[in-house]
């Protein structure tokens, strides 16, 4: 059974989440903000891939160290690839189904907070990066961000939510989608 482990790391006192997906046949690391030793210390099996939700500095600060420590292939959306500084990568695309370590990762292109942002759907759960935060959404007042795009992205991920869907964000605790629907004022109305 697949388990998504939240690893909270500190980047100059700013907390950011990294996720280690413990799948049946190995581990997948999602994002690599800081503290590579802590990230790699959470690994239980062979790391078969490193995935990136978006390329802001707080999500890639330890990327080089994690990649060299795992020798795993690196997956990123082409619109975010240049910002990582990593020359060799596997491109992510809308609707792509990655089969990694015996688990399926569905890729949704969810820009708005940053160019090339993606959400990974794992079972009924979603690793959303900074698309959704507890009681909020990712900032749209920074370069490359757009409220219009974030709203389109939210309308893409929200119809997939079930009562027990968990949302794994780049910052803060793991959220239940149904609780965010009830309390998050930034989420658009769900249209049936």
Image (tube, rainbow, N blue to C red):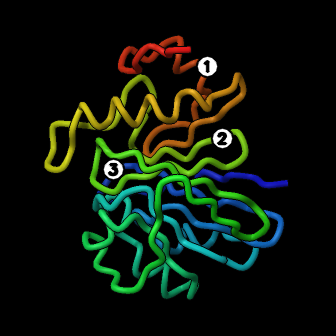
Q: Of residues 157 and 187, which is closer to you in this image? A: 157
**Residue 79 x/y as whole percent:** 30, 63
Mark before the other along the chain sequence, 1 or 3: 3
Residue at image position (72%, 79%) is 46
Q: Quadrant of residue 22?
A: bottom right
Q: Residue at x 40, y 72 (%)?
A: 62
* Residue linked to disc 2: 125
The answer to whether the residue labelled 2 contacts the one labelled 1, judged by CB atoms less than 8 Å apart, is no
The quadrant holding residue 124 is top right
**Residue 124 versus residue 139: which sits nearer the camera?**
124
The tag earlier along the polypeptide, 2 or 3, is 3
Circle 2 or circle 3, nearest the eye: 2
Can you identify the residue that label 3 sits on? 14
**Where 36 sits versus 182, above or below?**
below
At which x and y percent is residue 86?
34, 81
Quadrant location of the C terminus in the rendered image: top right
Look at the numbered disc 3 and give the secondary structure of its residue. strand
The reply to whether discs 1 and 3 touch (Cβ–Cβ < 8 Å) is no
Q: Looking at this view, is 110 or 176 the one in front?
A: 110
- Look at the numbered disc 1 and give the secondary structure of its residue: helix
Left-right relation of 179 to 156? right
Residue identifier under label 1: 178
Q: Nearer the viewer, residue 93 or 55?
A: 93
């Amino acid at each position: 059974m697949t388990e998504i482990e939240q690893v909270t790391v500190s980047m100059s006192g700013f907390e950011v989440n990294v996720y280690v997906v413990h799948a049946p046949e190995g581990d997948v690391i999602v994002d690599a903000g800081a503290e590579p030793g802590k990230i790699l210390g959470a690994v239980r099996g062979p790391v078969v891939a490193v995935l990136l939700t978006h390329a802001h500095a707080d999500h890639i600060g330890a990327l080089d160290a994690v990649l060299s420590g795992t020798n795993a292939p690196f997956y990123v959306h082409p619109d975010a690839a240049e910002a990582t500084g990593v020359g060799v990568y596997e491109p992510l695309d809308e609707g792509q189904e990655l089969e990694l370590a015996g688990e399926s990762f569905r890729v949704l292109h969810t820009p708005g907070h940053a160019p090339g942002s993606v959400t990974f759907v794992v079972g009924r759960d979603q690793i959303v990066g900074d698309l959704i935060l507890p009681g909020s959404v990712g900032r749209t007042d920074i370069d490359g961000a757009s409220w219009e795009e974030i709203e389109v992205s939210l309308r893409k991920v929200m119809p997939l939510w079930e009562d027990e869907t968990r949302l794994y964000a780049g910052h803060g605790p793991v959220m239940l989608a149904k609780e965010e629907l009830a309390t998050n004022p930034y989420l658009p109305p769900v249209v049936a």
